[in-house]
Amino acid sequence: MNYAIIGTGGIGGYYGSKLAKAGKDVHFLLHSDYDYVKQHGLQVNSVNGDFHLDNVNAYKSADEMPKCDIILVCLKSVNNSLLQTILPPILKPSTLVVMIENGIGVEADIQESFPDTYLAAGLAFICTAKAAPGVINHQCYGHINIGNYSCRDHSIIETLINDFSEAEVVANEVNYDEARWKKAVWNMPFNGMTVALKTQTDVLLRNKSTLQLIKDQMMEVIGAAQACGVKNIDEAFADKMINDTLVMTPYSPSMRLDYDNHRPMEIYYLYTRPIEEARKAGYKMPKLEMLEAELRFIAMTQNN
């Protein structure tokens, strides 16, 4: 199996580098970092041990890349329109495209554009970011869940999980809908709240008022998931997410980093779409609807 990494930032750079370090055939699509990585390679500074890739299969354009068996898409969802030109040159008839992105409804929309392509969700539980050109800082966690959306050849999913295991990345196959909504339980409160209040995860949980608000928002996501028919998700999961975050290194989620760096925020798939899906199922998310409105205002005023 060979791999393509589309989006060599904190997530794609980390998982792609781990696979390459384990001897897998990995091809990285880069943009601003291309010249640096081509000359200097990729550096991963990790809590689990630093390492460097000297010879990286780096490309400026997907047209230059080989067709790949598994494609890890690690773009921000605001850039998914780029996949219309990126994916066709590197797709085989049986290629598995793994969308390692946040939000609800990502795969459904991609499938409309690529109806015959195998899709899966990649739910990354990791604190990592690109610190400089060709440099990835991995702070904590690192496991990934794979939710099969439309792959009819289960052996490809099994190979992906085995390859991650050989790369010392904990990976598990999980129910698609359950995985997407469980990830939203963390993402919807913390991404938006760190932007709206210009803070980090640890500060939100140290304050009683914002801790309660985070819990309330998590329970809205859980209620929405249950209304949409998702099983195995309840208040105990919210408590686990809070406890896991309390022991994390103080962290700025991806939306806060996008805001700080004046990049578009992933409001649609992180907020608008799940709120719409919940409403279709007869469930309202008032606190998260308010947060979505605040984020849209912040985005509008930031760009003016």
Image (spheres, rainbow, N blue to C red):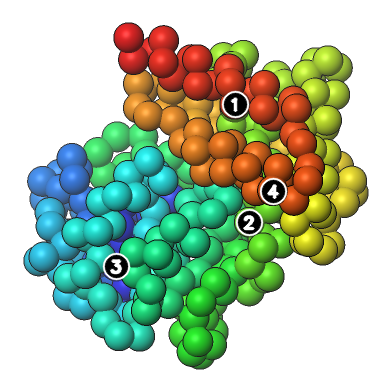
Mark 3 residue type? Ala
Give me the C-alpha separation between circle 4 and circle 1: 17 Å
Q: Nearer the viewer, mark 4 or mark 1?
A: 4
Give me the C-alpha separation between circle 3 and circle 1: 33 Å
Q: What label sits on residue 4 in the rendered view?
A: 3
Question: Considering only order in the chain, which callout, 3 or 2, is on the residue closer to the N terminus?
Answer: 3
Give me the C-alpha separation between circle 2 and circle 4: 17 Å
Q: Residue at position x 50%, y 87% from top? A: 152
Q: State yes or no: discs 2 and 3 in contact (Cβ < 8 Å).
A: no
Residue linked to disc 1: 292
In-front residue for pair 235/208: 235
Q: Nearer the viewer, mark 3 or mark 1?
A: 1
Residue 123: x and y in percent read: 57, 57
In-front residue for pair 78/241: 78
Mark 1 residue type? Glu
Q: What label sits on residue 280 in the rendered view?
A: 4
Residue linked to disc 2: 180
Mark 2 residue type? Arg
Mark 4 residue type? Lys
